[in-house]
Amino acid sequence: MDSSLEIVGLVTIILISAFAIIGIVVSIPLLRLINRFKFLAEKLNESLVPMVEKLNTTITHLNTEIGSISELTQSVGSIVEQLEKVVRLARILLTNPLIKLISAGVGLASGIKKAAGEEKNNEKNQGNKQRGRNEF
């Protein structure tokens, strides 16, 4: 019985040694792969952090510019509103006097024509009266 126990112990030692050798053989490339991933992560960290910071700065600057454009648009809108009010006021101030002036001019011209027409009629009537007197 001792010999079978010795054989089982020897087989166990051989199997444990084989698994240890397989574990070492597999773990060496696995450790290299892990080190490469670690190196890659460090390189990505080195390149991505400045890139993200630049992107953050760019977005902050862009937000500032958009805010300025928004303020400028509001200012232009306010100026346009004021200009519309000025145009309406100018239209009211100029249109009423112009209409009155044109109306007065038309009325004056009509009055002058009537006066001239009456004057001609008076001259004709006086001429006809004088002819009538001369005929008698």
Image (cartoon, grey):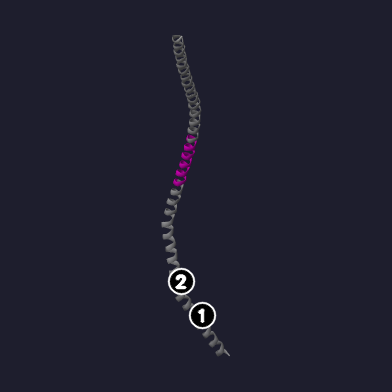
Q: Nearer the viewer, mark 2 or mark 1?
A: 2
> Can you identify the residue that label 1 sits on?
16
Going from the N terminus, do you reach mark 2 or mark 1 first?
Answer: 1
Considering depth in this image, is 94 or 33 the residue closer to the camera?
94
Where is residue 26 shown, x and y percent of the image?
46, 75
Give the secondary structure at mark 1.
helix
Image position of 23 with respect to 52: above or below: below
Is the Cβ of the residue at disc 2 closer than 8 Å to that at disc 1? no
Q: Residue furthest front?
A: 136
Report the quarter where the N terminus lies: bottom right
Report the magenta stretch's main SS. helix
Where is residue 134 shown, x and y percent of the image?
44, 9
Question: Callout 2: few (<14), some (14-19), or many (20+) C-alpha neighbours within 10 Å?
Answer: few
Where is residue 97 shown, x and y percent of the image?
49, 24
Give the secondary structure at mark 2.
helix
Residue 10 colored magenta?
no
Question: Callout 1: few (<14), some (14-19), or many (20+) C-alpha neighbours within 10 Å?
Answer: few
Image position of 24 with respect to 122: above or below: below
Q: Which residues are magenta?
A: 61-79
> Can you identify the residue that label 2 sits on?
30
* Residue at image coords 44%, 53%: 52
Dividing the picture into quarters, in which one does residue 40 lie? Answer: bottom left
Image position of 37 with respect to 8: above or below: above
Considering depth in this image, is 29 or 43 the residue closer to the camera?
43
Q: Amino acid at mark 1?
A: Ile
Marker count (numbered):
2
Where is residue 96 shown, x and y percent of the image?
51, 25
The residues tagged by marks 2 and 1 sit, at their Cα atoms, a distance apart of 20 Å
Residue 76 colored magenta?
yes
* Residue at image coords 52%, 85%: 11
* Residue at image coords 48%, 31%: 87
